[in-house]
Amino acid sequence: MFKYFHLTKMQRQSILKWSLYGLLTLLTLLLQTVVLSRTTGLRIKLTPYPILVVCVCVREGPEKGGAYAILAALFWCFSGADFGNLSVAVLPVGAMLSAVLCRAVLTLRFLPTALCAFAVTLLNATAIFIFKLILPPTVELANYWRILLPTAALSMVFFPLQYPLVNSINRIWERDELKRT
């Protein structure tokens, strides 16, 4: 049966790259839900997951990265994240807009990607905050400045760790494409 199952070198590298992205996504989700959810100093919960989604989406482009962002947001929603269903709408749109912005206007460098990751993290947290403020009011408006902005800013601590990992994984495919041209 397996004698008819032949993969080319490009297909194997693509499978390897997306498998590594999946593993990194799973590890980041575990870090956020298991480790960081228990350490809440000053009611601040760090969220490295949206930062990873933006990094991958910016590096892969709006098409492939957008598909990854949708799947990652669904994965986050099904993991039981707080208002994860809202993140299914906000996170992929923000990540794809970041990818388009970084490719069309900005460059694919560290600082523009960091700014986009911060903006999407803040946008996702703001959308969740607005729903918590409107539906059954469980938060106060003053918490936006005291908790939400520091949470988004402190979550950027994970960006210098995630960005080089995503770039290294992305180079698996780029090295072979450069050899072919």
Image (cartoon, rainbow, N blue to C red):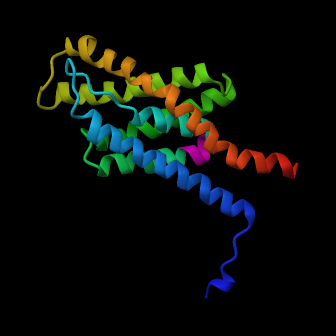
What is the x, y in percent for residue 90? 40, 36
Which residue shows up at 29% across the image and 42% down it?
A: 84
Relative horizontal placement of residue 138, taking residue 34 as reference (left or right): left
Secondary structure mainly formed by the magenta segment: helix
What is the x, y in percent for residue 2? 62, 83
- Front residue of 174 and 83: 174
Residue 88 seen in render = no
Whether residue 105 is in magenta: the answer is no
Q: Answer above or below: position of 6 versus 134.
A: below
Task: Please identify the quarter of the rendering in which residue 144 is found.
Answer: top left
Relative horizontal placement of residue 141, taking residue 172 as reference (left or right): left
Relative horizontal placement of residue 156, taking residue 30 as reference (left or right): right
Which residue shows up at 31% across the image and 28% down it?
A: 127
What is the x, y in percent for residue 5? 65, 79
User: Quadrant of the image for the N terminus?
Assistant: bottom right
What is the x, y in percent for residue 159? 49, 27
Segment tinted magenta in the rendering: 60-65
Relative horizontal placement of residue 31, taking residue 165 as reference (left or right): left
Whether residue 61 is in magenta: the answer is yes
Which residue shows up at 56% across the image and 37% down it?
A: 165
Task: Please identify the quarter of the rendering in which residue 86 is found.
Answer: top left
- Front residue of 132 and 6: 6
Residue 149 seen in render = yes
